[in-house]
């Protein structure tokens, strides 16, 4: 919603409208911020169980489990090749620390991948993510 008093010349009015609109866009982006976390687990691991646990414990609104893939990486001085599954975890920035701690407990890797991508979602989707991961009170 824009509100402005008209004074000065056309340039002054355009400038004020731009400032108010930019502020509105920035506020909307802050309200629609979500976090996407990437992690991989072994292809033989129970990805569905891990995904379900994260959603049940309200640490993730949604977890996508991608089909097994081949990963190449350097580990302890050697180049490794393993079959892994990629998990894409949607959560809020506020739940990030709890998600990282719990994933560290559940994950079988010595050093689990935990890559965080900050994202802006639609207001409706971001609201759903926020509701899905909000801690429940009993």
Image (cartoon, helix red, strand yellow):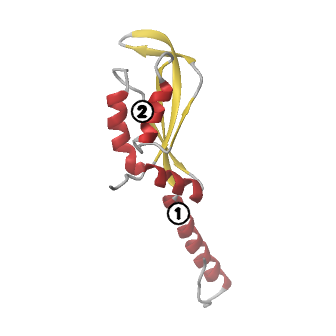
Quadrant of the rendering where the C terminus is positioned: bottom left
Q: Nearer the viewer, residue 44 or 109?
A: 44
Q: Could you tell me residue 80's position as x and y percent?
A: 46, 10
> 10 Å neighbourhood of mark 2: few (<14), some, or many (≥20)?
some
Residue at point 37%, 52% (across, down): 135
Q: Quadrant of the rendered structure where residue 76 is?
A: top left
> 10 Å neighbourhood of mark 1: few (<14), some, or many (≥20)?
few
Using the image, determine if residue 15 lies above or below residue 114.
below
Residue at point 50%, 51% (across, down): 129
Reading the image, the residue beneath label 2 is: 114
Q: Nearer the viewer, residue 94 or 119?
A: 94
Reading the image, the residue beneath label 1 is: 26
Residue at point 36%, 28% (across, down): 106
Quadrant of the rendering where the N terminus is positioned: bottom right
Q: CA distance from mark 1 to mark 2?
A: 27 Å
Q: Quadrant of the rendered structure where residue 99 is?
A: top left
Q: Could you tell me residue 79's position as x and y percent?
A: 45, 10
Residue at point 32%, 29% (across, down): 105
Using the image, determine if residue 10 lies above or below residue 42.
below
Q: Nearer the viewer, mark 1 or mark 2?
A: 2
Residue 112 vs residue 17: left or right? left
N-term-proximal mark, 1 vs 2: 1
Q: Could you tell me residue 128's position as x and y percent?
A: 53, 54
Q: Secondary structure at mark 1?
A: helix
């Amino acid at each position: 919603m824009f509100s402005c008093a008209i004074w000065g010349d056309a340039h002054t009015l355009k400038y004020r409208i731009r400032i108010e609109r930019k502020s509105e866009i920035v506020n909307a982006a802050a309200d629609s911020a979500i976090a996407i976390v990437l992690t991989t687990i072994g292809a033989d691991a129970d990805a569905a169980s891990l995904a379900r646990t994260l959603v049940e414990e309200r640490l993730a609104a949604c977890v996508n489990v991608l089909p097994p893939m081949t990963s190449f990486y350097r580990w302890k001085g050697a180049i490794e090749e393993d079959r892994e599954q990629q998990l894409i975890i949607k959560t809020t920035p506020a739940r990030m620390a709890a998600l990282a701690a719990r994933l560290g407990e559940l994950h079988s890797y010595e050093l689990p991948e935990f890559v965080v991508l900050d994202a802006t979602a639609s207001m409706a989707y971001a609201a759903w993510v926020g509701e899905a991961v909000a801690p429940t009170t009993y």
